Amino acid sequence: MLSEGRRIMRNVYVVGIGITSFTRLEYPVSEIAAYPSMMALNDAGITDVDHLYVANMGSARINHQTALASAVVDSLSLTPAGAAVVENGPASGASAIKAGFAAVASGLHDVVLVSGAERMREVNNLEATDFIATLTHPLAEYIYGVTLPSHAAMFTRLYMEKYGVTERHLAMVAVKNQNNAMLNEFAHLHQPITLEGILDSPEAMTNNPYVAEPLRFFDACPVSDGGAAVILVSEDVAKTIDRPPIRLAGIGQATDTHAVHEREEPTDLLAVRRAAAKSLEMAGLTPQDVDVAELHDAFTILEIVESEEVGFFPKGEGHIALEKGQTALDGSLPINPSGGLKGKGHPVGATGVAQAHEIVTQLRGEAGDRQVNGARVGFTCNFGGFGNNVVCLTFVRED
Amino acid sequence: MAVDLERILRPEDHPLEPFEAKYMMLASGEHMVIRQIDRDEIPDVLPYLEPLLHVERDYYDVVCARIYSELLAHYRYRAQDEYVLIAQIEGELAAVVNGRQVSGDLGMSLHTIALRRGLRVGAHAFAAKMEYHIDILGHKEVLVVAESPIGFRRWMIEYQLDKRFETPHELGGVPSWSLTKELFDRARSTLVVGRRPVPPELLAKGGSQDPATVGSTHAPGRLVGGHQVHVRPDGDRPHCAA
């Protein structure tokens, strides 16, 4: 049935991108969405869109701003274009891109702007942590005080026991991604770190204390404000725009049980596995065809596990590929050249769009010092909840 | 009759035991040296603080204006029993902390200002300051306040300070918090780090003390390094989100 539908879908291209610095931004969340949108419009050289999707998770709760899309479309002087918010937890960004894709592919619209934005640092760290924890199961998890760091810690402990991942592997992800972020002017953390400094020195336990054992401070992403935008257009429109032809060739989405303990094997991230398979199948590609990937490393363990579930490496061997340097910027499959959530930052609603921004930048060959040479196929994994709602995107440069 | 007004205005300092310099490795892999400076070096420190006088974020302006005035007052002999410690990374000024001895039992923590963020530079410097009060000067408690939420998180929460709200702090008369020796001992294993003696090559990078004078308050050297002030107000990270 899906393939039947695909036959009548139009090709969809990304012709414009924009992003803010990921940091602490002291202006309204609607402006955080509008600014990268303007950059994307400028990048594409277009002034009108048919529809705007805004990806956001928490503006109503933490910024006291609802109906965000209505504010953004007017701020951009894009009225009377349609506008709607997509809220799907930390997977809001890629979910909004999926909505935009569907609108263009179906023929409903020719030009769709997708903007993701979040302003999380308006509240303190405790409130931000609680805000994110509201995505957990209300009766089985949240009321018992579960937070995302605690979820990730339990998951990590199981993974360590089952597959031999160690704290050193986690630290290697942190060092790799935070150092990649040094090459990204938009990244939140511009601070290189070393294994010695966060793991081996006598001061390491103070520099890098446990947050939720076995996860330490540098195993977690920062809380960031930020926005990112992409413009999706039909093939006919893309031909009129002088930008490299980057096709959004595959989209896969899958869900899993809301409560993590209900999963048959809690160390499996089935939604990642299924979403990735769908996305790559739709693009007619395999994991081995991917040149560069942005994976959702809200915690360092997630990059390792997602790299396996996507199919880049066999199950249980992601940390071995990491050890061999395969996921480094100069490795055979660079993962998170942008710095990932760990180094670039994680404004939750913007993250999925920012991942797409990085991949398009890479496929265009415009990534500067972090450019993956010859990249023509890029992949993103936007991970919602604790793996209960995942959206994967596959991009292909066509010329 | 001639009056020596300066003699009246200038408080008489009591001799304070010196703080022996120490060093530590940061998350970045860089070594940071924390050492005591005396009056002679204060003019070298002040220009590094000036740019922060106008940074509103995280109360840098308030903290900087106050510590600037405290250092100046110390330099011009208008503060009593004040001391200053600085942190340097590869010779570059990274943090300044200061305080005062009120009595043999009581210390008054004044300010902590970090010029680089995201590496616990300020936290390490604050810990050194508390170490100086409790372990070297022998104070039974140190009165502390925070002007910024970051300071509150670093001092009041991480050290679980006691409330001394009935006692106004010297900084703005606001209610004080107290670090006792017991609290410091509890925090010692997790928050207080540093190695001694400092290798001569590290001190040389600091352009500061002659190794022979380690432990002396009379360091002959000067600050070196660029004048670039590394303040990324966002470099400090709270918790995480998935």
Image (tube, rainbow, N blue to C red):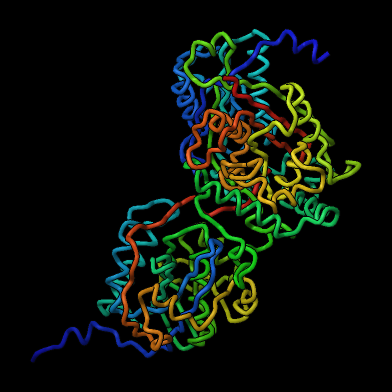
Q: Residue at x 71, y 37 (%)?
A: A383
Residue B7, x across and y down, in percent: 21, 87
Q: Which residue is at the front of the view, A398 or A348?
A: A398
Question: Which residue ends up furthest to the left in the rendered image?
Answer: B1
Q: How many marks?
A: 0
Tell whether A34 sits left or right of B53. right
Q: Is residue A250 above or below residue B129?
A: above
Q: Residue at x 77, y 35 (%)?
A: A272
State the image quarter where residue A42 is shown: top left
Residue B160 seen anywhere in this rendered image of the structure: no
Q: Is residue A336 above or below residue B170?
A: above
Q: Residue at x 59, y 77 (%)?
A: B184
Residue A248, x across and y down, in percent: 64, 22
Tell whether A171 sits left or right of B138. right
Tell whether A334 sits left or right of A78. right
Placement of the C terminus of chain A among the 4 image quadrants = top right
Q: Which residue is at the front of the view, B146 or A237?
A: A237
